Amino acid sequence: DGGEAMYRRTLELDPRDVNATVTWLDAAHKRNRPEEAEFHFLRHLELKPTDSNAHCNMGHVRKAQGDTSGAANAFRTALRYDAENTEAREGLAAVEQDSN
C-alpha cells in the first residue's frame, strides 16, 4: 500500500523519526504482524522509553504472541509511566485473569 511504502521510506532515511515509527508500528499491529510491530515498538521505546502508550501497545503485541508474562510486564511498565492509562490497566487485568 502507498502509505506503508511512504513510512517505510521515511524510516529508511531517518530511523529516529518518531512519528513515522509510531505510524508504522500501529499499522503492523493492526495488520496482525506482531513480529514486525514488536521490532518497531522496541525501536520507538529506544527513542521514547517513558511512552506509556507504546509500552501498553507492546503488551498487546506480547499477548498476541502468547507471552503473557511479557505482556503483564509491558502493561505494568505502562502504568508506572502513566497510572491513568486505562487501556494498560484493562490489559493487565485481562492477562492476569487469563493466567488464573
Image (cartoon, rainbow, N blue to C red):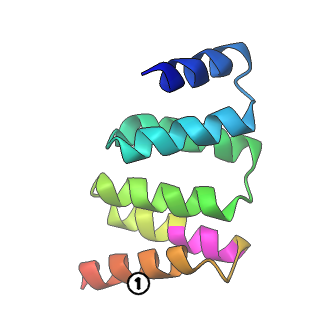
Q: How many marks?
A: 1
Residue linked to disc 1: 93
Q: Nearer the viewer, residue 9 or 50?
A: 9
- Dot 1: within a 10 Å radius of its alpha carbon, few (fewer than 14), some, or many (20 or more) residues? some
Residue 78, horizontal then vertical, whole percent = 62, 69
Range of the magenta residues? 75-80
Under tag 1, what secondary structure? Answer: helix
Q: Residue at x 51, y 74 (%)?
A: 87
Is 16 on the left or on the right of 30, as rendered? right
Could you say which quadrant of the image residue 24 lies in?
top right
Is 72 on the left or on the right of 64, as rendered? right
Q: In the displayed orientation, state which residue is furthest to the front.
A: 2
4 part of magenta stretch: no
For the C terminus, the quadrant is bottom left
Residue 84, horizontal then vertical, whole percent = 67, 83
Q: Residue at x 38, y 66 (%)?
A: 69
For the N terminus, the quadrant is top left
Q: Residue at x 31, y 43 (%)?
A: 32
Q: Residue at x 50, y 55 (%)?
A: 58
Indicate the amino acid at tag 1: Ala
Reply above or below: 93 against 1: below
Could you say which quadrant of the image residue 29 lies in?
top left
Task: Assign the magenta stretch its main secondary structure.
Answer: helix
Reply above or below: 62 against 8: below
Residue 41, horizontal then vertical, whole percent = 56, 44
